[in-house]
Amino acid sequence: MLRGLGEAEYIEVRVKQEMSSLDKMWASFVGMGLMIVASLLITFARVKLGGFFRVVVSIIAFLLLLISIVFMLASLL
């Protein structure tokens, strides 16, 4: 526990800590990697697949894109 702080203040300090620069870097790398995988999946789905599998792979790519957006926003904060 931090000196001079009660339990509630210590918990508040712990919650307000920001990500370190290294954590932000890794979050942005993960976000970029997921974007690359999503774009490759969309390209594969449009070129090689058809019907039901095309829809499934496209939905998976879209979900990966949403997750990558979350990681990229986390790296900005």
Image: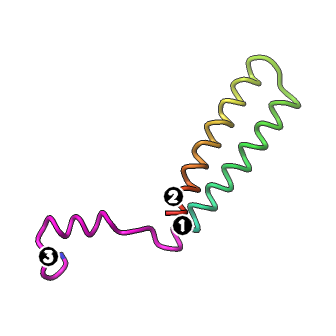
Q: Which residue is mark 2?
A: 74
Which comes sooner in the sequence, label 1 or label 2?
1
Q: Secondary structure at mark 1?
A: helix
Q: Residue at x 14, y 64 (%)?
A: 8
Residue contact between numbered discs 1 and 2, judged by CB atoms under 8 Å? yes
Q: Left or right: 44 with respect to 32?
A: right
Alpha carbons under labels 1 and 2: distance apart? 7 Å
Alpha carbons under labels 2 and 3: distance apart? 29 Å
Q: Position of residue 24 (x, y in %)?
A: 54, 67
Q: Amino acid at mark 3?
A: Leu
Which comes sooner in the sequence, label 1 or label 3?
3
Q: Secondary structure at mark 2?
A: helix
- The magenta stretch is 2-24
Callout 2 environment at 10 Å: few (<14), some (14 to 19), or many (20+)?
some
Q: Amino acid at mark 1?
A: Lys
Callout 3 environment at 10 Å: few (<14), some (14 to 19), or many (20+)?
few
Q: Which residue is mark 3?
A: 5
Alpha carbons under labels 1 and 3: distance apart? 28 Å
Q: Which residue is mark 1?
A: 24
Q: Position of residue 6 (x, y in %)?
A: 11, 71
Q: Position of residue 25 (x, y in %)?
A: 58, 68
In magenta segment, residue 12: yes
Image mark count: 3
Q: Amino acid at mark 2?
A: Ala
In magenta segment, residue 4: yes
User: Which residue occupies the foreground of this view, 13 or 49?
Assistant: 13
Q: Left or right: 8 with respect to 42?
A: left
Q: Residue at x 61, y 37 (%)?
A: 63
Q: Secondary structure at mark 3?
A: loop
Which comes sooner in the sequence, label 2 or label 3?
3
